[in-house]
Image (cartoon, rainbow, N blue to C red):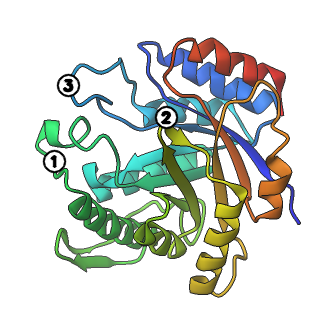
Amino acid sequence: MPKILRGIAVPPFSDNPEDFADLGVEVEQAGFDGYFLWDHMVFSNSGDGPPILDPWLILAVVATRTSKIKIGTMVTPVPRRRPWQLAKETATLDRFSAGRVILGVGIGSPSYGDFGLFGDPSGERERADLLDEGLDIMAGLWSGERFGYQGEKYKIDPVRFAPTPVQQPRIPVWVAGILPNRRPIERAARWDGFVPIRYDSTGLARPSAADFTEVGARIADQRGNLAGYDLAVWAEVAKQPAEEIGAYEQAGATWWIETARPEPDWWPGIKNRVAAGV
């Protein structure tokens, strides 16, 4: 069984983008395998959220200052992006990084603060439909072949996008979704990875190893097998490498991603965690 890969994810909630570019370099030097940034506009339904930086511009800088780690977003809400613009941006970043991009996607949240506030569709079903059509469009444009599309949400006349991403047949797409909902699992099985999410009474909670066993079986049943497929644990930041990783690895998880949450002292906490290494 391949060794589980290790990643760090952070919300770029700050007014200093250089800090996050530096952190990406530190993540690689500390021996981690991936560096991921959240993707939000406001992160507050009141319209008065924290300062938030654009993840894609930071990742472009990280790409030029690193050589090994995977980089990407966890997660980009495709429903509030024009999929052809996102296809162009990610293909460019994949070339900047020599094929190291992973695109995490989802319907996005908060529904008002990141969508309705700006007049974008905020209903879950409509955002899910926009996500599905958006992903199909991106895959078609990434192919470099002449591509047209006619859906309920989008229409594209035949066009050929160039250059293509370094990674073929496409940039890996990981779908995030809340358990135990069925549709995100079915969606994820059509792409390259799944990031299961759970909530409890306190908020975001790490899914159990048993969840991964069950989800992996359902995705394998839909795909035929899990060869080359990623299952990523969205874990909390630990003061030291967590002992529970082995159970998740046995359950089929391929990535363990420790994500900082915008709580008091989260920045020094993640800096200390990265300094401790894998």
**Mark drawn on residue 202:** 2
Between residue 226 and residue 263, name the one nearer to us. 263
Res 182 quadrant in image: bottom left
| Contact between labelled residues 2 and 1, with CB atoms less than 8 Å apart | no
Q: Is residue 17 left or right of residue 41?
A: right
- Determine whether the residue tagged by mark 2 lies in a helix, strand or loop: loop
Quadrant into which the C terminus falls: top right
Q: Is residue 207 above or below residue 38?
A: below
Q: Is residue 213 above or below residue 20?
A: below
User: Which is more foreground, mark 3 or mark 2?
Assistant: 2
Q: Position of residue 202 (x, y in %)?
A: 49, 34
Residue type beneath disc 2:
Thr
Place of residue 144 in the rendered image (x, y in percent of width and height, measured from the top left): 44, 71
Q: Pointer 3: what residue?
A: 46
Badge 3 local density, few (<14 within 10 Å), some, or many (20+)?
few
Front one among 116 and 14: 116
Instruction: Identify residue type, mark 1.
Output: Asp
Query: Is label 3 or label 1 in front?
Result: 3
Q: In the displayed structure, would residue 144 be above or below residue 240?
A: below
Q: Secondary structure at mark 3?
A: loop
**Which of the marked residues, 3 or 2, is nearer the chain's N terminus?**
3
In the displayed structure, 120 sits above or below 159; it is above
Q: Could you tell which of marks 1 and 2 lies nearer the N-terminus?
A: 1
Q: Residue furthest left?
A: 119
Camera-nearest label, 1 or 2: 2
**Residue 34 percent coordinates (x, y):** 68, 42
Query: What kind of residue is marked 3?
Result: Ser
**Residue at left offset 56%, top offset 72%:** 169
The answer to whether residue 91 of the structure is visible from this angle is no
User: Which of the numbered marks, if any, corresponds to residue 120?
Assistant: 1
